Amino acid sequence: MKTLILASESPRRKQLLQEAGFSFDVASVKVSEIPDKNLNAAEQILDIARRKARAAFTHLKSSKEQEFTLISADTEVIVDGELQGKPADKDAAFRMLRRLSGKSHDVQTGVCIIDSATGKELSQIETTKVFFRNLTDQEIWTYIETGEPMDKAGAYGIQGLGGKFVEKIEGPFDNVVGLPVQLVKNLLAQI
């Protein structure tokens, strides 16, 4: 049986795969996550997920004897067609959360899967629309002081304290956390 490998250090992605009953190894690689400005937002996300997958695949292909299937992902918050990324500092986190306040935004995750036996590569985007209630400046700063927003796309974690800002979502919850498990299952079935 082929080994399943998650090319990510994200504890949230690991947890989602474990909760879905998958047995897998973890192998992460460092690649540039600077978006290609010549692509639209969805293409940028898929491009980053593919870069991660291909880098991990190349690294593992030379060192692994047995066949494997590799999963990588990139999750981004998109407001008005612009990727928000992760905040560089507390002021950037404030600006992001202020921009999300009282509006809806899209969370998109690009998933890329590569099979080592065939070299077959599949990738796809999942989108969830998230609606934020109006936030006060004090709420935003109190949240930023918890430290939670600092390593999250869009400066919030829906599965954590940031969930209190969300009025509703349209689409998969796990996609907002960082890995749309049903999409992963669908792609694995095609590999």
Image (cartoon, grey):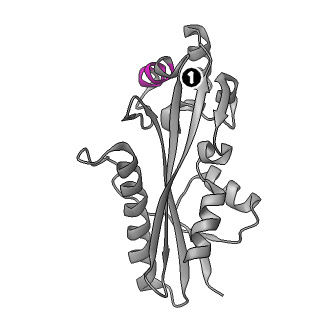
Q: Mark 1 = which residue?
A: 144
Q: Is residue 83 left or right of residue 133?
A: left
- Residue nearer the viewer, 171 or 19: 171
Measuring 52% from the left and 72% from the top, which residue is drawn there?
70
Residue 1 horizontal side relative to residue 191, left or right: right
Q: In the rendered view, tell whether residue 70 sits above or below residue 127.
A: below
How many labels sit on residues? 1
Question: Does the image show residue 56?
Answer: yes
Q: Looking at numbered disc 1 in the image, what kind of residue is underneath it?
A: Ile
Looking at the image, residue 146 sits to the left or right of residue 27; the answer is right
From the viewer's perspective, is residue 46 above or below residue 21? above
* Residue 147 shows in the view: no
Q: Residues within 10 Å of mark 1 (few under 14, many from 20)?
A: many
Give residue 18's position: percent from left, percent from top. 73, 61
Give percent across and percent down for residue 19. Answer: 76, 58
User: Which image quarter: residue 48?
Assistant: bottom left
Q: Residue furthest left?
A: 38
Q: Which residues are magenta?
A: 91-97
Specify whether residue 95 is painted magenta.
yes
Pick the quarter of the image with the C terminus: bottom right
Instruction: Judge by depth and name the residue closer to the eye, 117 or 57.
Output: 117
Between residue 78 and residue 5, name the one nearer to us.
Answer: 78
Please state the horizontal and vertical placement of residue 20, each as a whole percent of the image: 74, 61
Can you tell which quarter of the image residue 88 is in?
A: top left
Image quarter hosting the N terminus: bottom right
Task: Answer with left or right where residue 38 lies relative to residue 137.
Answer: left
Instruction: Name the residue located 23 percent from the left edge and 47 percent from the top edge.
Output: 38
**Main structural element of the magenta stretch: helix, strand or loop?**
helix
User: For the point 40% across and 63% down, which residue is it?
Assistant: 50
